[in-house]
Amino acid sequence: MGKQIAVFFLLCLGWTALAQSARPFAGASLVFQWVEGTSLTSLMLQAGSYNLGGGLGARASVGIGLSPSFLELGADLLFPFGTGRLLPYGGLGGNWVGLGALNFFGIRGLAGVSYSTASDTGLFAEAVPTLYLASDATGIYGTAFGIQLRFGVNYLF
């Protein structure tokens, strides 16, 4: 039940950001992730905005693990470094990765670039280093480092 509430909350956060912005987006990406040498590939769905005002953006994301099977939830603050068709950005955020009985809670930074191919479509690439706190049913047992490489497309509204 807790996971369902978290998914609903993050989707609401993303759609709220999308509704309040001059540059809202929704999109999907293929994510290649490595956590302490273990490869995790996923499909990520996201919604948010590059400009909520004051030079900040936000997004929420839900990832579905392809190999192995897992669920990932995330939220990020985005800091765009300009405007126009080519938009570099950075950000800070957090995420949770659930691998059955094993859970990873992460704090992450990100660096990416978005290129608007048309007035309503943008391609993006990101590198996302993450520091995880790992836990299972017996409690917290350590930290792990991970990195994600994301490649995807956003539809700009």
Image (spheres, rainbow, N blue to C red):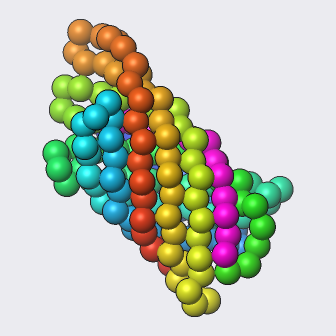
Judge by depth and name the residue closer to the eye, 25 or 121: 121
- Majority secondary structure in the magenta region: strand
The answer to whether residue 157 is left or right of residue 150 is right
- Quadrant for residue 18, please give it: bottom right
The answer to whether residue 2 is left or right of residue 46 is left
Residue under the point 40% across and 36% down: 146
Residue under the point 41% across and 48% down: 148
- Quadrant for residue 42, please give it: bottom left
| Viewport quadrant of the C terminus | bottom right
User: Residue 11: x and y, percent?
Assistant: 45, 54
Residue under the point 42% across and 54% down: 149
The answer to whether residue 89 is left or right of residue 67 is right
The residue segment tinted magenta is 86-97
157 relative to 97, above or below: below
Residue furthest to the front in view is: 37
131 relative to 21, above or below: above
Is residue 7 in view?
Answer: no
Judge by depth and name the residue closer to the eye, 39 or 30: 39
40 relative to 25, above or below: above
Judge by depth and name the residue closer to the eye, 138 or 21: 138
- Quadrant for residue 71, please give it: top left
User: Residue 124: x and y, percent?
Assistant: 51, 69
The answer to whether residue 87 is left or right of residue 12 is right
User: Residue 147: x and y, percent?
Assistant: 42, 42
User: Residue 116: x and y, percent?
Assistant: 59, 81
Query: Quick check: is 110 in the magenta stretch?
Result: no
Is residue 74 in view?
Answer: yes
